[in-house]
Image (cartoon, helix red, strand yellow):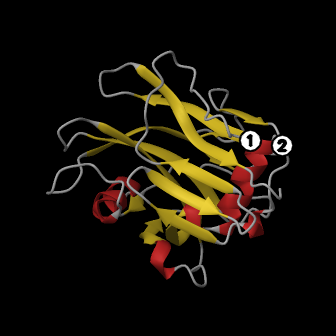
């Protein structure tokens, strides 16, 4: 499993996201930029041990109402070919050196492991502690997942990111998170799988909602 290094990052992840978030269509914060605080998240392991995978939740209080965002990120030791449009920024890591941080929805390693999580072939890991499962992350799968390579398009809209495959399958990653009133996220009727999790709400309570929903197409 991936080792969590407790070391300095320059710039920090929150500093990178402060610059990057306003460029997203699902950003709901103030015109002067977000005011971010870390609110939760989890990690997944890269089977090859090369790419860091983190699903970070940050809360922004700059807008009319506080908003919590899910930001899947990958951390690489070299640029990802063809993913210049998905680069969030670069950081200097106190142990690993320069790291390239990408919007993980455009990184095939993250997409593959997210599908593995939905299917139950991967286990969510604690965001801050090595070799520790995150028991707050739940998942389901009612049918076979498409192959990660099938998802050839990733497009942002005002609520999230939709990854689509030619045969009609779609993987929606929720970005502006919506807490479920009864702490049990309601799945859409055509869902074939999902990931849900919890995060710290601005009022100090623990919120819960959907992180990702898989829908399979007619030919899946």
For the question of whether residue 124 can be seen, the reply is no
Q: Are marks 2 and 1 in contact (CB under 8 Å)?
A: yes
> Which quarter of the picture shows residue 108?
bottom right
Q: Where is residue 202 in the image (x, y as percent from the top left)?
A: 31, 28
Q: Where is residue 163 in the image (x, y as percent from the top left)?
A: 61, 61
> Which quarter of the picture shows residue 92?
bottom left
Q: Is residue 27 above or below residue 122?
A: below
Q: Distance between the residues labelled 2 and 1?
A: 6 Å
Determine whether, in the image, residue 142 is placed left or right of residue 202: right
Determine whether, in the image, residue 8 is placed left or right of residue 50: left
Q: Which residue lies furthest to the front in this view?
A: 218
Residue drawn at x 28%, y 61% as measured from the top left: 22
For the question of whether residue 83 can be seen, the reply is yes
Numbered circle sitting on residue 192 = 1
Q: Position of residue 105 (x, y in %)?
A: 57, 61
Q: How crowded is mark 2: few (under 14 residues within 10 Å), some or many (20 or more)?
A: some
Numbered circle sitting on residue 55 = none
Residue drawn at x 68%, y 40% as measured from the top left: 190
Residue drawn at x 78%, y 50% as measured from the top left: 116
Front residue of 22 and 157: 157
Residue drawn at x 57%, y 32% as measured from the top left: 197
Q: In this view, does 70 lie above or below 113?
A: above
Numbered circle sitting on residue 143 = 2
Determine whether, in the image, residue 82 is placed left or right of residue 201: right
User: Which badge, 2 or 1, is on the more N-terminal residue?
Assistant: 2
Q: How crowded is mark 1: few (under 14 residues within 10 Å), some or many (20 or more)?
A: many
Q: Residue furthest top?
A: 182
């Amino acid at each position: 499993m991936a080792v969590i290094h407790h070391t300095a990052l320059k710039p920090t992840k929150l500093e990178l996201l402060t610059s990057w978030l306003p460029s997203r269509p699902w950003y709901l914060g103030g015109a002067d930029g977000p005011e971010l605080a870390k609110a939760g998240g989890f990690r997944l392991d890269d089977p090859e041990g090369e790419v860091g995978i983190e699903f970070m939740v940050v809360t922004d209080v700059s807008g009319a109402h506080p908003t919590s965002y899910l930001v899947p990120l990958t951390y690489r030791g070299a640029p990802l070919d063809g993913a210049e449009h998905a680069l969030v920024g670069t950081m200097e890591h106190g142990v690993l050196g320069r790291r390239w941080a990408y919007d993980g929805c455009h990184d095939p390693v993250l997409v593959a492991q997210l599908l593995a999580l939905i299917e139950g072939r991967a286990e969510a890991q604690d965001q801050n502690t090595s070799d520790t499962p995150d028991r707050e992350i739940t998942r389901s799968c009612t049918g076979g997942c498409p192959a990660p390579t099938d998802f050839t398009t990733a497009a942002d809209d005002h609520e999230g990111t939709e990854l689509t495959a030619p045969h009609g399958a779609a993987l929606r990653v929720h970005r502006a998170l919506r807490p479920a009133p009864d702490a049990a996220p309601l799945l859409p009727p055509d869902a074939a799988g999902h990931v849900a999790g919890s995060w710290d709400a601005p009022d100090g309570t623990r919120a819960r909602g959907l992180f990702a929903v898989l829908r399979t197409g007619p030919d899946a």
